[in-house]
Structure formats: C-alpha cells, structure tokens
Amino acid sequence: MAAILSAEAVTVRFGGITALKDVSFEVKQGEFLSLIGPNGAGKTTLLKTITGIVKPANASIKINDREITKLPTHSRIRLGLALTHQIVSPFKSMTVLQNVMFAAGYKKVRNIGLSILNFSRSSEKKDAMAFLEMVDIAQYKNFPVSTMPLGILKRLEVARALAIKPKILLLDEPLAGLNSQEASRLADTIKLISQNGMTTVMIEHNLSEVLRISDRLYVLDNGKYLASGNPKEVMKQPEVRTAYLGS
Amino acid sequence: MGPYEISLATGVGIYVILAVSLNLITGYCGQISLGHAAFFGIGAYTVALLSKLGWPMYLTLAAGLSSAGIIGVIIGLTSLRVKEDFLAIVTMGVAFLFVGIVRQQEFFGGEMGISGIPSHGMTKFAYLCFVLVFAMLSILFSWYVKKAWIGFAFDAVADDEGTARTLGLDIKSYKLTAFAMGTSMAGLAGGLYAYYTRFIVPETFGFIESITILSMVAVGGIGSTFGVVFATVLLVMMPEVFRFINDYKLLLYGALLFGVMRFKPEGLSGFYTLLTGNKEK
Amino acid sequence: MLFIELFIQGLIQGSTYAIIAVGLTLIYGLLRVLHVAHAGLFTLAAYLGVTVTNQFGSLSLGIVVATLTSGIVGVVIYRLVYEPILNKPPYVALIASIGLYIAMEELFRLIFGPFGLSFSSAPLQNVVVIFGIHLRACQIITVITNVVLLGILAWIAQKTRVGIGWRATVDDPEMSASFGIDPIRVRYLVFFVGSALAAVAGVLVALLTNLVEPTMGAVPSYKSLAIIVLGGLGNVFGTLIASLALGVIEAFGTIYIGDFLDRDAIAFAFLVVVLMIKPTGLFKSR
C-alpha cells in the first residue's frame, strides 16, 4: 500500500542544538504507528515539523505524494492532518461542545467571505455531539472547559481533532497525565477510531498501551532514527532497550 | 431637546461607534490596540481636507472610512509580524506617530489644525439622527459579526492562536479583517466628528484619546457589545452631567480603568452575567 | 563641532532613558508585565527630590528620600496591583497599569499644582569645559551615573547570588524555587531596584531641566516601552544600547528631520522601522 504521509531527511536545529538529524519515515493508509523514544528524542519536534509549526533546516514532507513542505500550517491541516496537543489547549472561553463545534465548522471558516455569510450552527452542533459521544464525554457538553478535569480535556482534544475530518490523526501524548484506568480506556477509544479506518500517528510514553494498540513502532533517540517495525520485535532489539533503560 | 443636549447626544453617538469598533479588534479578536484614536484622526483629517475641496458628504465619509481602513490593514500587517506584547507597543507608537506627523505638516494645518470645515447642511437635530443611525448600524454590525461564523473564528483566535491554526484556521486573514473592520469604522466616526465640530486639532487624536476609547471598552467588558455601549454612554455623559467631575475627568478615567482591571476584569458585562446567571456569548 | 555636540547631547538624553527603561525591562523579564506606571514613580521621585532639597537645602537628602520612597512604592504597587492579576490575560495588567499611571499623573497635578516646581537654587549647574565643549556638571553626572548604575546592575546579575537568583527565576520559577531561591522575594527586590533607578532618573531629569511637571513622566514612559522592545525585552545590555542609540538619533533627528516628524515620534518611527525589518527587536530577548 502507498504511503499516505511521508517525511524525508528531516533535520531541525534550534540555535546550536540539532533536534532532529536526517530522520525519514512514512505512514501507510489505515496504519497505526507509534513514535516512541526517551525524552528529548525529538518526537514532538517531528510532529511539529510535519504540521509546519517548527521550521526545519531541511525536509521533504508529502501527503499522498503531494509536497507540503513549503505550505503554512493551516494549509497543511486542510490537506487532511489533525493534531492533538501534548499540553491540552482547549479554547478557554468556550464550552466543551463549542470547542468541537468550532472545529466541525472548519468549512465555514475556510475564508473570510464564507465565515461572514454563514450563520447557522445547527449542523455543526449535531456533528460535534457525535464526536463527543465517540470519545464518551457527551454528558459534559455544556460545561465551560475551565471546570473540566484533565481526563475530559484529553478526550476533548481527540474529539476536536476528529471534528475537522482529517485523513491522518497525529496524537501527541494523548495518555500522559491520566491514571492507568483512564489511560487504558482512552487507548481503547483511540484503537477503535483507528480500526474504523483512521490513519494514526501517536507519540506516547505509556509503553504497555503502545504495545497493546500499535501496528508498528518507530523509535527515535537523541534526534536520530533508531529502529522501526513490528512492536514486539522492535522492543527486543538491544539498542532500543539501551536507549530506554539508559546506558 | 435643547442645542446642548443635541450636541451631547451627537458626541455620545460618535463615541459609541469608536468604542464598538475597538471592541471588534480587542474584544472579539483579542488584538490589543493602544492607538485607535489615530484611525479616528485619519478619518477626521481625510474628511476635513476633502470637504474643503468641495467633495460632497457621502464621498468624503466613504473616503474617511476607507483611508482609515487601508492604513489599519497596514498596521495589522505589522501585528502579524510581531509578538503580542510588541503589538501593544507598536499600536501605541501609531498613536504618537500620527500626532507627530500631522503636527509638523503645513498641509494638515500643523498645531493649529483645520478650521472652516464646510457644514453638513442639515439641522443639528437631523445630524444627530444621522449619527445615531450610524451608531445603530455599528451595533447591529458588531452583533451580526458575533453571531456569524466569523465571530466564532475571532473567539478562537482571541483564545489561542496556535490551537486555532492547528485546526486549519488562517489566522492572518482573520486578524487583518478585524483590523480592517475596526479601523474603518473608526475612520467613519472621525468623519462624522469633523462635520460635527467643523474644527479639528491634532491633540484630539492623541494617545490619551486612544486610552479613553480603550477605557470605554474595558469598563464595559472586553468583548461584550452591550456592555461597551452602556459604558460609553455612561463615561461620555458623566463629566457633562456632573460638572464638577470635569476637572477630575482624567483622574476618574484612570482610576476606573485601573479599578475595573484590578477588581473586575470582565467589566460591567461581568455584573450583567452575575445578575442573569448566564453568559452573553 | 555641531556633530560632536549633538552626539553628546544624545548620550546625556539616552542615559536618562536607560536608567528609566532598565527597571521596566527587568520587571518585564520577570513577570511579563508592561509596567507603564513605572514612569509615575519617576515623576514622584522628581517632585520629592525638588521638595526635600528646597526644604532642607541638601540634594543628597533629596536623592535618598526620593529613591527610598519610590522603591517602596514600587514594591507596594507590585504587591497590591500586579500580584493578584498575574494569571489574567496580559492586557489586564497592561490596562490596569495605564489607568494607574494616568491617575497618578492627575494626583500630582492636584497635589503639586499644574505649573510645575523648580529648585530654589538649582545645584550642579556649574559649567565645565571638556575639549572645548561646554557641559554642566549635572550633565556629566547623568552619564557617569548611568554607566556606574548599569555596570553595577550587570555585575550583580552576572556574579552575585542574588543576580543568579534573578536570572534563574526569569528562566524557570519552579526550578529556582527548588534551589531555595524565593521567587516572591526576587520580585520584591526587582521592583524595589527598578523603581529606585527610575527615581534616580527622575531627580537627574529635574536637575537637567530644573522643572518638574505632572506630565513629565508621560513621554519617557511610552518611549521607554519602545526602548525595551528594541533592546530585547528583559535584556539589560540591549536596553542600554537602545537607549543611547535613541538619544543620539533624537538629537540628530530633531535637527535634520524635525520638519517632518516631531521629536517624540522619532522613537516610534525608529521602532516601527526596526520591527518591520527585524520583528524580534535589535537584541535577543531573555
């Protein structure tokens, strides 16, 4: 199967530090890929480079063989990417439902003209409800996000990302900060979304959940490619174990 | 209504347009501006100069509106390049630059300003109604923007630009649009002001005036159109009604600005929320 | 000769900007607050300096009273105004600060009258000739004070425990707390030192112009905001260079482009041009 998303020869420097050095990877249609590696390995930087938030020194990023490296973030997102944030970042003046509604109305805010002429929010409300149900937080819809605990906000991140109907879902540590029970439940939800056909790339430190739900692992260490492949086999490789246990 | 009340009400109408227009930029879209009076001034000067050339009123007003809007977009373009803290300072700079340039130019009448602006050709009362129609239109426009999807997008930009961008929103166009809308409305207010006083001087459009407009928005409750309109009427009328306040007008504005931000950053609309128990938006 | 004279006038003016602006930039570096009311303390100190000197005939006493009072009022402002609203959106503190400044300006007008105060016999006005250029003692003292105070400040920030505490608090408040540095105490200290510096500038300007007015803080206050952006917010050295550069540019600008732009707008024209070319300011922000 052809790669739906590919990143080739990604090099990123911050000041004098090289955060990513010549990293390449690709994701196939429908695949569930997990990006793992110790802290500071460059995982988040890689996702931010793909979405255009970080400017690379060198890279070639493609969605369905279309070169997107020079596009601004919002144009890349419109080609089918969605990103959830490691540190939850809901729109604070809105309720849970409004957060997802805004995302669901992405077509109505594509340009200024449409956004001025469009008034009705009812169909987005319906869509948003469906996404809230998908991640099991529909009962909190009318609460302001400031009153919500982290577990709900982590799910809200996922619902909001799904609401822009992406082809590829990029998840940055969706389980971080959750207790093991919450983490396991959200992992199930994510797995279900992936099984319904969503191509998924996930950064996650919770290895037991990663091994449980991923199709494939991609390991980064210190800004460089270390290993990739079937989860169980990758974890057996000695260099991966060393990177994780620290030598 | 005596001539004094008519004149006062006309002033209120003009300030309502100004405050509502700043609320679009700062309240809705979250872009702080400390130089709004400069756009008020650009409108007033454009209208003053063109009307003295014999242009008809509808054309001069349209020119005032567009000249302020165009310069507003140019300033908006700067805002896209700088970080948020810088934006406050850049817009403050615009306030000083406007007065600094106008004051030194013969063409703009220098320190003496421009006098002898032609009459609008209406009775004072008719002109009041004319201004109030524009004030109503501004309020309606502002209300419409809030309810349409563009208002939703402004909310998102004001809350968290970065996140809005990762949802595919083209932040730049929204910020520029907010600047274009707000500054052109201020230009219109400037034009109405020029016909109203028929005499303008640079100081009227300085930094303190920008802060006066900002205090109307802040006291009313940043982002709440009705709160802002209410605060504007209150703040313009108060020194007029209680004459003794006039000497302490700036002290009052300063203390109010400070007090509201320190103790009730949601402004008057915060009290409204307390009373009704729900949020306006 | 005109060239050198303008250059020196620029350095003198720039030195007063630097002493005011450095407090602002320290405070910004620490709290991300644009402390407009800082210039209110500058004015307060100028009034205190002139009043005390006239009353007791001692400039030194005037300086001490002005500096200590402003320093303490600065800390009080932090404690009562900024501390409770630090977690609100940034415009809240900015607008509160502008309101506070305007109210202070009006209070000075009500208390001291609108026409200003002067020294009954202004000290340090004796003329010194250096390389054929006539300078008043207070002008030379202004430049020297600037160099000495900012030098000491740079030394404190780099070498002493307090300075390291300040820089650590700027970089990472939680981390510095875990090393036993009390971030709250660092904030009090920065407000005290910054406000005391503004006070020194206030007394110096009073000596230079021999006139203290309620509105004397307005222009330096807004100008110093432009300066701290140019100097890289939170960067002491950058602030010094930007202040001196602005002083010099203004001195020449008033002569050569004064017909087009008035003096007080030059700073902002300079700022807008620089930001257009280099959106991050002239120097790296801390």
Image: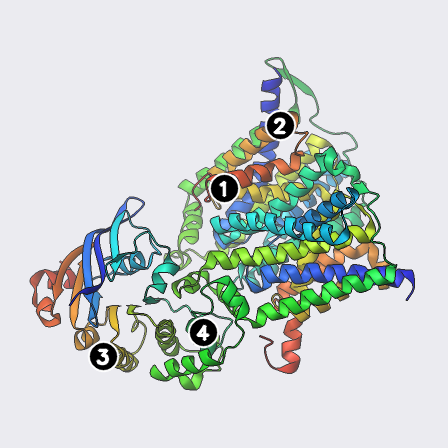
Residue A195: image tag: 3
Pointer 1 with pointer 3, Cβ within 8 A: no
Q: Nearer the viewer, mark 4 or mark 3?
A: 3
Discs 1, 3: same chain: no
Q: Chain of mark 2?
A: C
Work out whether residue A204 can be spotted.
no
Left/right of residue B43 with respect to residue A130 in the rendered view: right
Which chain contains the residue that carries disc 4?
A
- Mark 1 or 2: the one toward you: 1
Q: Are marks 4 and 3 on the same chain?
A: yes
Q: Which numbered tag is attached to residue B237? A: none
What is the secondary structure assignment of the residue under circle 3? helix
Residue tagged 1: C276
Residue B1 placed where, x, y %?
Answer: 90, 67
Location of residue A88 by image quarter: bottom left
Name the spot of residue B267 as percent of width and height, x first: 65, 68
Q: Is residue B214 above or below residue B114?
A: below
Which residue does the numbered mark 2 point to in the structure image?
Answer: C251
Label 4 or label 3, whichever comes before in sequence order: 4
- What whole-number distance in Å separates the C-alpha atoms at marks 1 and 3? 49 Å
* Chain ID at mark 1: C
Mark 1 to mark 4 CA distance (whole Å): 35 Å
